[in-house]
Image (tube, rainbow, N blue to C red):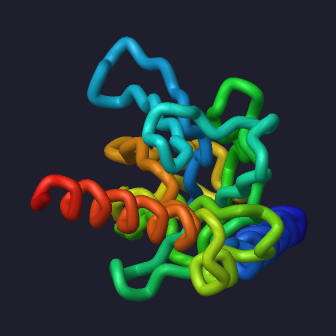
Amino acid sequence: MKKLLLIAACIGASVGLVAQTSTGGSINFLTKVSNADPTKAIDVKVFDVDGTTVINNASTPAITAQLFAGATADSLAPVGTAINFLASGYLNAGKVLTPLPQGSTAFVELRAWQASAGSYDAAKAGGLKWGRSDTISIVLGGDQLTPPAVPANLVGLRSFSLIPEPSTIALGALGALALLALRRK
């Protein structure tokens, strides 16, 4: 009987320890996932300002990307670390943990920016290249302490293009004005 009580106490302590160290729901930070079911496949690339050039690890200037997640679309915060694009133009950071609980609905957005800025907000404020995906909602998968629950895939995420530096926008606007002026004459 003493052995049975000792075993029960050890199991109880183990369960308590797991509950205390649980880190939240998880997302599978992959932008290319093949699947026999087309509704679960993902093929997302980020394009440069021209809308056709795929960002990759040889892009100049270097572009960094990171997932942002939150309980609401207005409460997005960075999760995981910022990563560089693969040579193929995709991202693969593996499992990213969030502060939200497993099974909860999270709002997720992919943001990319010119790496020299140091952050998305700094690139946007500093006139460097930046861009973001539409915000999607997903049900979070399990954390690293619950192996049966797999991370949630970014199903519904779509490709997007970076927004150009203001000088590029200014040149485009100037060219459009010049065409308008020529057309009037």
Looking at the image, the residue that sits furthest to the left is 184
Residue 3, picture quadrant: bottom right
Residue 181 shown left or right of residue 78 in the figure: left
Give the side of residue 164 with respect to residue 39, left or right: right
In the foreground, 82 or 107:
82
| Residue at point 45%, 46% (across, down) | 154
How many discs appear? 0
Q: Quadrant of the C terminus?
A: bottom left
Measuring from the top left, give residue 116's x and y in whole percent. 82, 68
Residue pictured at 42% horizontal, 42% vertical = 159
Task: Answer whether residue 146 is visible to the viewer in this image.
Answer: yes
Q: Position of residue 178 (x, y in %)?
A: 31, 61
- Residue at 43 percent across and 31 percent down: it is 42
Against 31, residue 110 (above or below) is below
Give percent across and percent down for residue 78.
Answer: 63, 75
Out of 96 and 167, give the one closest to the viewer: 167
* Residue at image location 60% in from the left, 70% down from the top: 98
Q: Is residue 27 above or below residue 156?
A: below
The spot of residue 142 in percent (x, y) is 57, 55
> Extreme top residue here?
36
Res 139 seen here? no
**Relative to residue 132, is residue 90 depicted above or below?**
above
Give residue 68's quadrant in the image.
bottom right
Q: Is residue 133 left or right of residue 56?
A: left
Question: Residue at the front extreme?
Answer: 185
Quadrant location, the N terminus: bottom right
**Residue 50 or 8: which is nearer the viewer?**
50
